[in-house]
Amino acid sequence: MTTSKSIYRGYRFPAEVIQQAVWLYFRFPLSLRMVEDLLAVRGIIVSHETVRCWAEKFGRIYASKIRRRAPQFGDKWHLDEVVISINGKKHWLWRAVDADGFVLDALVQSRRDRRAAEKLLRKLIRKQCRAPRVMVTDKLGSYGAARTGMGMNFEHRQHKGLNNRAENSHLPTRRRERIMNRFKSARHLQRFVSIHDPIANLHNCPRHAMSSSDYRALRSEAMAAWREIAELGVAA
């Protein structure tokens, strides 16, 4: 199943099993033990700790490949931040999405001030290689202060009702937070979103905006892309 250059070299389980475990963990709000049980139903006996190791190693590899092949995202950015309690301390998950709901980036920070907003903006501009045409946020003053401090003059729309797209992007993280009984550390949260969001982008098919046949075609394309990214079907 593997070659000398395969990312699965040295692993006892075949690529099909490893990628399926990683896909289940990041595609759906499942705990490690739930993935363990789903694999056991199919006669694949692995521990939840093995699933965790696969998710961390191969999840990073898959997410990196997805980022490299992703098309250029839209120039209308929706930014939002949500508080997440970790070990009794407040952290803020800052996330940006484009007008089509694709996640541009996410950043875990301990503050909610101008410097935190500016750090997110600088990271976004560096990765997207351009500033936004329009930035949509809620009424938090940190965004406007960051834009002014950076000397940027793009349009900035501040209205809570306009930013539902960014607010909805936090829902998968909230569901995972409940399943996992909270994240263990800020690093743990950052690692999770850095893998989860690219995989979610790959499978971003707005079902409500298209016919069933079009949705199934896009879903098939996404799964074909996933198999290519996971290096499935590689000749021995």
Image (spheres, grey):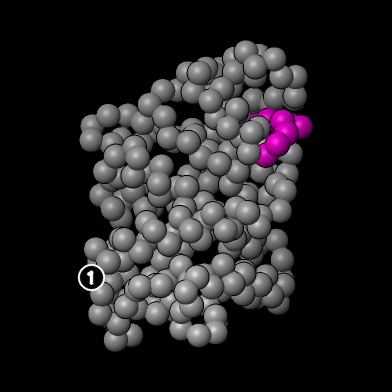
Snapshot quadrant of residue 163:
top right
Provide the secondary structure element on which disc 1 rests.
loop
Q: Position of residue 13 (x, y in %)?
A: 34, 78
Horizontally, is 170 left or right of 207 in the view?
A: left
Residue 79 appears at what percent x and percent y? 58, 34
Image-quadrant location for residue 162: top right
- Between residues 114 and 216, which one lies in front from this camera angle? 114
Q: Residue at x 70, y 47 (%)?
A: 73
The answer, for residue 24, to whether it is visible in the render is: no
- Look at the image and tell me whether residue 99 can be seen: yes
Q: Residue at x 43, y 62 (%)?
A: 58
Question: For the point 46% across and 68% down, which residue is it?
Answer: 7
Task: Please give left or right for residue 236 compared with residue 79 in the image.
Answer: left
Rendered view: 68 above or below 208:
above
List x then y, in percent, for residue 4. 47, 74
The answer to whether residue 130 is magenta is yes
Name the foreground residue: 131 vs 3: 3
Instruction: Residue 112: say if magenta.
Output: no
Name the foreground residue: 180 vs 229.
229
| Residue at mark 1 | 47
Above or below: residue 36 compared with residue 41: above
Q: Which x, y percent locates residue 22?
A: 41, 66
Q: Which amino acid type corresponds to the residue marked 1 in the rendered image?
A: Ser
Residue in the picture at 70% in, 24% down: 156
Residue span colored magenta: 128-136
Residue 184 shown left or right of residue 226 in the figure: left
Q: Residue furthest front?
A: 4
